[in-house]
Amino acid sequence: MGWDWPWKRGRRDGARLQTKSGGYGFVALHAQADAQWTRRDYAALAREGFMRNPVVHRAVRMIAEAAAAVPWLLYDGTAELSEHPLLDLLERPNQRGAGTSFFETLYGHLLMSGNAYVELAEAGDARELHLLRPDHVAVATDASGWPVALEHRHGGTARRVALGGEDGGGALHLRLFHPLDDHYGFPPLQAALMALDIHNAAGRWNKALLDNSARPSGALVYAPKEGGNLTEDQYARLKEELEEGYSGAARAGRPMLLEGGLDWKAMGLTPKDMDFVEARNGASRDIALAFGVPPMILGIPGDNTYANYQEANRAFYRMTVLPLVAKTAVELSAFLGPRFGDGLKLGFDADRIDGLSAEREALWARIGAADFLTDDEKREAVGYGARL
């Protein structure tokens, strides 16, 4: 039998050869290596997370789609405006898509990169909003270290877009809090990087087992009482019987009959030993926790934090979706408001969110039962103005 040693000739690092009575040798390999983690750049996180991991994919889509569907409101002081060019711009930011698609991509960039870059293009009265992919953008600073512009590179071209407002355009940089960086945001997925790699590695291990014809990881040890080795014919016959009788998914788990001094030695942990299913579920819960999505909504078993699905859905909106929308509304108000007039402020209509309909009905019931309030006071309490 030919051995393919995992070390170079003359080295014995991490291995020890033990010889025991009975005429056979046993090789014990001891290897210690550091874990291999996914790189932390945007492309790697997007590829290993959103594009290859179902938990990350679903969590990001749920947050981005829910946040993008929240209706915008515009106020001039305390008065709500139902029609305005700023609302039209948010409804149709550019010719390539509507506002829902635009904001879904914006929130996706924030969740996957920790950063989102919005460019405003102006030509007279015509205005358009465009998103710049985070891995194509670098923040440029002045001599004092303050951010002043974005350097956008695509293909072989590079251009500079000033941050803030100026005639002819400008750019807005939205970012999530980063404790160690003054200019770039921290993506939620990076906090769950270990869980992501564990979840993906478990899937690759399972796929590799199937690709390996569902053969168990181990070795047949030949230890005859009288000593000696297998002949070429015996070795060929044994190999053929193993491949034909015990390989393949349909024959996985078939009992093996050993004779003539043969013994099976397992050389790897079984899925049961590794607690395979619970390891994947635990990694899934950590990923959901990093994004702020209740595991119950994602269908991850073993989490009973919320009494029912409806309660988990309300928590998802209140603790994850609405804070993200509110942060975006404040940033867009500061960026776009001065271009359309002083005193303009963006908000959102939480009453039109289906996931919060139960809270809205409960509020209306409490206000309606309050006999000590006038009709105008009741209308003001639920967000409506007085009757004209």
Image: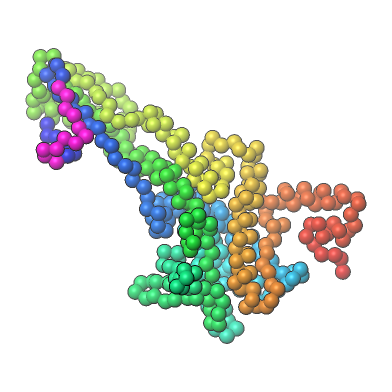
Image coords of residue 112 (percent x, y): 47, 56
Furthest residue toward bottom: 124
Quarter of the image containing the C terminus?
bottom right
Work out whether 368 lies above or below 89: above
Image coords of residue 95 (percent x, y): 53, 74
Image coords of residue 137 (percent x, y): 43, 68
Work out whether 2 lies above or below 174: above
Residue at image point 27% right, 26% down: 266
Magenta residues, as a range? 8-19
**Is residue 126 visible from the viewing direction of this image?**
yes
Image coords of residue 115 (percent x, y): 49, 62
Residue 16 located within the stretch drawn in magenta: yes
Residue at image point 54% right, 35% down: 302
**Is residue 91 visible from the viewing direction of this image?**
no
Residue 100 located within the stretch drawn in magenta: no
Quarter of the image containing the N terminus?
top left
Furthest residue toward front: 144
